[in-house]
Image (cartoon, rainbow, N blue to C red):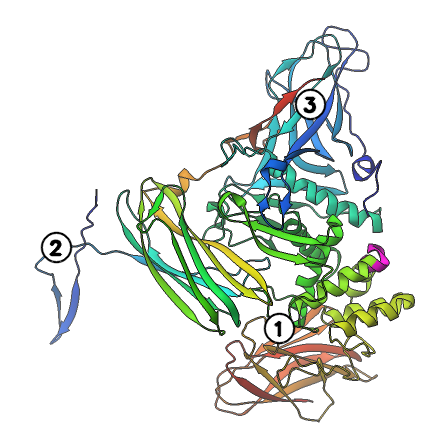
Amino acid sequence: MESKGRGLASAISLVVLLVAGCGGGSDGGAPILVSGVVTFDFVPTSVSSGLVYASTSKKPARGIVIEAINTADLSLATSTVTDDSGHYVLVLPRNSNVKVRAKAQMLKSGVLDFQIVDNTSSKALYVMDSAGFNTGSSNLTKNLNAASGWGGTSYTTTRTAAPFAILDTVFKCVSKVTTADPTATFPPLQINWSISNINTSGSLTAGQIGGPHYSPSENAIYLLGWADNDTDEYDDHVIAHEWGHYFEANFSRSDSLGGRHGYGDKLDPRVAFSEGLGDAFSGIATDNKDYIDTYGIRQGRVGVHLDLEDGNGDDKSIGWFSEDSVWYILYALYKNTGFTPIYNVLVSDQKTANSFSTIYSFSAFLKSRYPAYKAPLNSLLASKNISANAIDQWDSTQSETNDGGVTGATPIYVLLTTGVPTTVYVGDQNGGPNKLLNRRFFVFTIPAGPATAHTLSVDRYVTSQPKIRLYAYGTNLVSRIATYVDTSSISFALGTLSAGTYYGEIFENSASGSIPFTMTLN
Amino acid sequence: MNSASLNAKCVAALIGGLIVVIFPLSSSFAVEETIHKVIAPSGKRSAPIEIAYTAPESASIGESVGVVVTSTTLADVTDLGLSLTAGEGLSLSTGSFERSYGAQSRGAAFSETLTVTPSTNGLLYLNVFAYASSNGRKLVNASAVPISVGAFPEKMLKRSGASELDASGRSIIIMPAEEGNN
């Protein structure tokens, strides 16, 4: 739970740069204090009616950068950061002409730098300026509010509040992380938002972002803003879900393939875990179990509503391949244990795991690190038809029996033994390319001794084109693809391997139906 | 006003070692370039419906153009439906569009052809809301078909303000504040 009183913004030390020396204003007198509260229009969501503009309220803009700008030459006079109440204080010379600027930026040198930028305007940073004024000879109060721009039936003025509403959700996410680790440092993050951002394929600079998403290649987030279609700025769970992906990528490790994920999907377990973690984190960060995604004319409809405490989620997909099963387990665990155990497992064990990031790896590490939580976690796993008897991150004893109704989906990892042929099936029975059975996992151990060269031979139909990837501790060691040759057996070189455990995947990009691959480790 | 685009079709044929270029007798007909795209999956939770469209590469003010929107189910669903509305600067010949397809198995596809007419230059959109129910829950995909109108539609993008440089050289967009003093 978010603590009252001094929180993150207080932990972000107020940076006050005194200009013109202490005790000296522009006319030699004592400096002036310009203070106030910065707020933004907050529009709540409703499960039944989307955004409820009639219930708009003002909320404090916490932890954002405030600057005083000299209006004569637009130079920076001084800067500070708002506290948990949105309050700021600037020390300025007497009788100086300035304006106050609130930046859609959370900044603490060496700790965090989060910015809301416009991807249709070369990543320009959103700011909100007061009118210019003279500081005079007495302390001044300047309260600034970022208006929603809503005119009753449509947006009629600048949607100034949107970037600050987004940043408020980010503040909650950061606050939750720092409750688990007060010394956490956050890689810089730009969150791209524009009133022209819309869910269609095309150019990012034209706002055609294809839906809200976290971009691993840019380490950035993109959010929607096109009114009367789909906007994200007030959908705090949508924002926190994407920030959860940023958190997973930068603090833990994501092995997700990405791609489409929805009700009924039986997913690749790495996708199920990553998306389920994002959903659960949205509730953890906001301490609100209701994930609501609004859309439509006047933003008055709800496209998706998840009750993160509802155990009766997706009835078509229950198990280790289910996003719903994962978020249910993680959120229920959070309600039981708080965020710290979950955080510690993600940033320590999961980050360096010698296996793919799945509910199996997470569960194995949590039970090992926190034996007291083994029983409640096992109960949650069992409630979602996931084996509670897996002894490790690979389920080496192959205890899992839930194959999602698709033959060949289990065991989670096939165990390869030198010289022993092992057959797996890949296929698109659940669709593709990020679904259950599109890729199959394998694991093997090289015994103690000098490093030696190894190969993996694959017997296959000559028309298929298997691909293999080999990993150790999250690092991709080998990536091979079969060429189209008229032989039924292909040998993939794995390189020289030292003693230890290795894991990997085999798949076929254009798998149709069920395709057998018989693998032999040599 | 419709704009007529003149294109000469040239057909080159190799006849007996000679290259013969054939021009049609009529040179005043329009060739409409169309694009076909599948809207990429959203990063957030969405209904199991894929939306694809065929639309003209560009259009002119007042020119009515055809758009085909195809919905394909990615899972078994109940209450599959499609709702289309014209965004700002665009009008639908039917005013609005709403169609229900009922319960459908995975892989079911439905195509709808509509006529839209732009009344302004810029990047305009046909709003596409595809919905389906699963386990008693209604899920919606909100997406859009772009209609590009005019010579430089991206220059007419809606923005929250003009960008300028601050004193440090950083590009910023200045938005107005509501002010109040105690």
Quadrant containing the C terminus of chain B in the rendered view: top right
Residue A361, percent from left and from top: 77, 70
Confirm whether the magenta stretch covers residue A342. yes
Which of label 1 and label 3 is nearer to you? 1
User: How many numbered tags mark residues here?
Assistant: 3
Residue visible at 16% across and 65% down in the picture:
B11
Confirm whether the magenta stretch covers residue A44. no
B14 above or below A156? below
Residue position for label 3: A143
Q: How far apart are marks 2 and 3 (CA)?
A: 67 Å
Q: How far apart are marks 2 and 1 (CA)?
A: 58 Å
What's under tag 1, amino acid-wise?
Lys
Q: Which contiguous range is marked in magenta?
A: A336-343
Disc 2: which chain?
B
A466 above or below A38? below
Callout 3: SS: strand
Assess whether mark 3 and mark 2 are in contact (beta carbons under 8 angstroms).
no
Residue position for label 1: A316
Task: Choose between A331 and A33: the one closer to the eye.
Answer: A331
Q: Of label 1 and label 3, which has the lower sequence position? A: 3
Disc 3: which chain?
A
A307 above or below A514? above
In the picture, residue A258 is in which quadrant?
bottom right
Residue position for label 2: B27
Q: Is residue A450 left or right of residue A154?
A: right
Residue visible at 73% across and 35% down in the picture:
A62
